[in-house]
Image (spheres, rainbow, N blue to C red):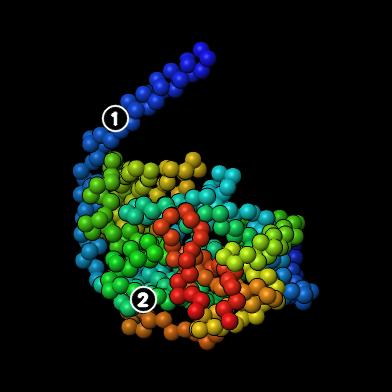
Amino acid sequence: MNLFIRYLLSIVLVPLLSVGPVFAQRASARTSVNRGNVNRNTNVNANKSVNANINRNVNANVNRNVNVNVHHDVYVHGGYYGGCCYHTNTAAVVATTAIVTAAVVGSRVYALPPACSVVIVNGFTYQQCGSTWYQPQFVGTTTTYVVVAAPR
Amino acid sequence: MRERLSCCVLIMSFSLTLMAQSSSAPKKEDVDPRAMAALDKMGTYLRTLNTFQVAAVETTDNVLDNGQAVQSGGVVDILVARPNRVRAEIASDDMDRLLFYDGKNFTIYGQRVNYYATVPAPPTIAELIDKLSERYAIDMPLVDLFMWGSPASAERTEITSALDLGPSSVDGTTCQQYAFRQEGLDWQIWIQQGDYPLPRKLILTTLTDDARPRHTQILKWNLAPSFNDEAFAFDPPEGAQRIAIAEATASPTNETKKLQGGVK
């Protein structure tokens, strides 16, 4: 119960305290439930089909630390992921690394840096974060952001 | 030098042993014809269903870089009207997605991120499954339901072992449990007894990974769903943003993807 209250507090406080709004909320809420400490780099997914028997490794090395939705954590919290709130900076560190490497056109990240604005060019959505442009994309069913040359 | 030679001899004899073992692999007597007949019967029956709705509870193991298998879970609700309409809702630990197929277009929509992507689609579900898988690396949820009983189905060629394990209950319904082996994959299926031979539970164990990751599905069927045409057409909610789907490249593990309908 104590943990739950702490979790609620983190949800409420984090948006109030954070400067870089969207990103900071996500990272903090994420780590507050301990699942953020799990590095979900995956090698091979289980076969999901008897027939196709496809094991395409599509999700290879997807770092889901910064990608998992906050809503999901709410469910996790009630369950077996008990002890929380230790490595508050873990996800932030990971995400910062992503930002550093993200400037290269063609590179792919799973969360955006703070302070981006949505720009629509030719009907497609872009995120402009400073001088870097990201194009949101589905890769398989996963949402990702690819660094692209400025579209205009 | 002598050491190296003896080492070579050892390796050679070892690989000979291996070859001898692998050549004796599948024996036909491991295949119980009753189990194969049950698969056939289920497949034939599934072909007769023109509209159906399935609610599935799924679990999937993902293998971490350290070799540990960790489970993620989710639910799939799929509505199918053959030959060319599908609506699927996926809600898992990692994502929520709606898939729409109306015979002309395919749309994937993420509710929480409020992104969607629409691409032109082929005229049948079977062709859609191939296109999604090969071009966009998207697996149709519960894809086996569309494959069993078709000419391309696994039971025609792939199965090396088939066992009938007897009655077993799923959600209070008596089923018959079967176990099958294919190259790199063990699987079990629970088929409902009686006049409606529906798959009710499926467990897949991938053998090509040391962690032996598993995928499970428990299926609830509705054979008389009510729906209208709008169920299959995507109408973007306010604020939803259209994005692209990355095209899978020829190399299956390659992470670099081409933009689809991208920058102009």
Q: Residue B21 vs residue A26: left or right?
A: left
Identify the residue shown where x is 49% and y is 79%: B264
Q: Is residue B52 visible?
A: no
Mark on residue A17?
Answer: none
Residue B10 pos. (x, y %): 45, 19
The amino acid sitting under disc 1 is Ser
Q: Is residue B209 visible?
A: yes
**Chain ID of residue with mark 2:** B
Residue A104 pos. (x, y %): 63, 65
Identify the residue shown where x is 56% and y is 58%: A62
The amino acid sitting under disc 2 is Pro
Q: Which residue is mark 1?
A: B24
The C terminus of chain A lies in quadrant: bottom right
Nearest to the observer: residue A114 or residue B254: B254
Other-residue count near label 1 (Cα within 10 Å), few / some / many at <14 / 14–19 / ≥20: few
The N terminus of chain A lies in quadrant: bottom right
Examine the image and state in which quarter residue B13 appears: top left
Identify the residue shown where x is 66% and y is 59%: A36
Q: Does B228 appear above or below B252?
A: below
Identify the residue shown where x is 58% and y is 47%: B65
Q: Residue A89 vs residue B225: left or right?
A: right
Q: Does A110 appear above or below B3?
A: below
Mark on residue B120?
Answer: 2
Other-residue count near label 2 (Cα within 10 Å), few / some / many at <14 / 14–19 / ≥20: few
Residue A115 pos. (x, y %): 70, 76
Which dot, 1 or 2, sits closer to the camera?
2
